[in-house]
Image (spheres, grey):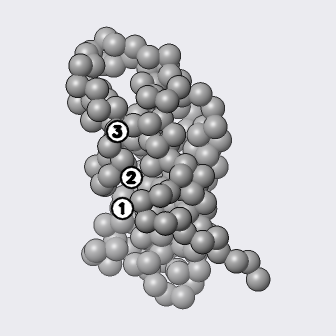
Amino acid sequence: MTTTPALPEPGAATVEDRVQISRRFIQQAPGELERGDRLQATEKIWGALAQMLKAHGQQRGWFNLGGHRTVGHIARQLHLEYDEIDVVSAYMAADNGHRNFYDNEMSPPEIEDIITVVADVLPELESALYEPPRPFTIRDGDLWRMRTLTGKQDLQVGDSSPTGFSNTH
């Protein structure tokens, strides 16, 4: 029998804690679906991706990690830096699953597809977590997101960073 690692104390999650929580949730999602709990299955999928994306934000020392919108900002930023990882498709799939938690509109095959999409991208995101962030130059559509993530309100279009505007690299 596999034991589930204990959760960290509230507010004390490290980057590795978030990775472990992400793994836990993606492992639990198929079981929830098998038990017929489509709502919990889709919420576990959302949680798995959200925790991995928040691990990236935390690892970079980004300012604001709270909330649904921030998870989307991190997904967009990682998509721009790691074009070989289909972060946006995984985010959109997981977000649709998250909506299912509220609306109960998805069938088991649809949920299985979402589990596959997210489960496929999580190892790639985890590997990227342990690489240095990639260079990034702020374009017109990036400014607000980068100011929000980094907490640096003086950033401007055209500003560049060799480490994706990480506050810790």
Q: Earlier in the sequence, mark 3 or mark 2?
A: 3
Element type where label 1 sits in the image: helix
Q: Where in the figure is residue 4, as x and y percent of width and height?
A: 65, 74
Element type where label 2 sits in the image: helix
50 and 31: which is toward the camera: 50
**In contact (CB < 8 Å): disc 1 and disc 2:** yes
Q: Earlier in the sequence, mark 1 or mark 3?
A: 3
Q: Is residue 96 above or below residue 81?
A: below
Q: Amino acid at mark 1?
A: Asn
Q: Is residue 29 left or right of residue 89?
A: right
Q: Please give the label number shown on residue 63.
A: 3
Q: Which residue is mark 1?
A: 96
Element type where label 3 sits in the image: loop
Mark 1 neighbour density, 10 Å: few (under 14) some (14–19) many (20 or more): some
136 and 93: which is toward the camera: 136
In which quadrant of the rendered view does residue 11 lie? bottom left
65 and 52: which is toward the camera: 65
Which residue does the image show at 28% across and 49% down from the upper left? 69
Q: Which residue is mark 2?
A: 92
Q: Is residue 117 above or below residue 4?
A: above
- How far apart marks 1 and 3 lie (CA) works out to 26 Å
Q: Is residue 116 above or below residue 44?
A: above
Q: Quadrant of the N terminus?
A: bottom right
Which residue does the image show at 38% across and 74% down from the upper left? 106
Mark 3 neighbour density, 10 Å: few (under 14) some (14–19) many (20 or more): some
Q: Amino acid at mark 3?
A: Phe
Q: Amino acid at mark 2?
A: Met
Q: Where in the figure is residue 38, as x and y percent of width and height?
A: 44, 80
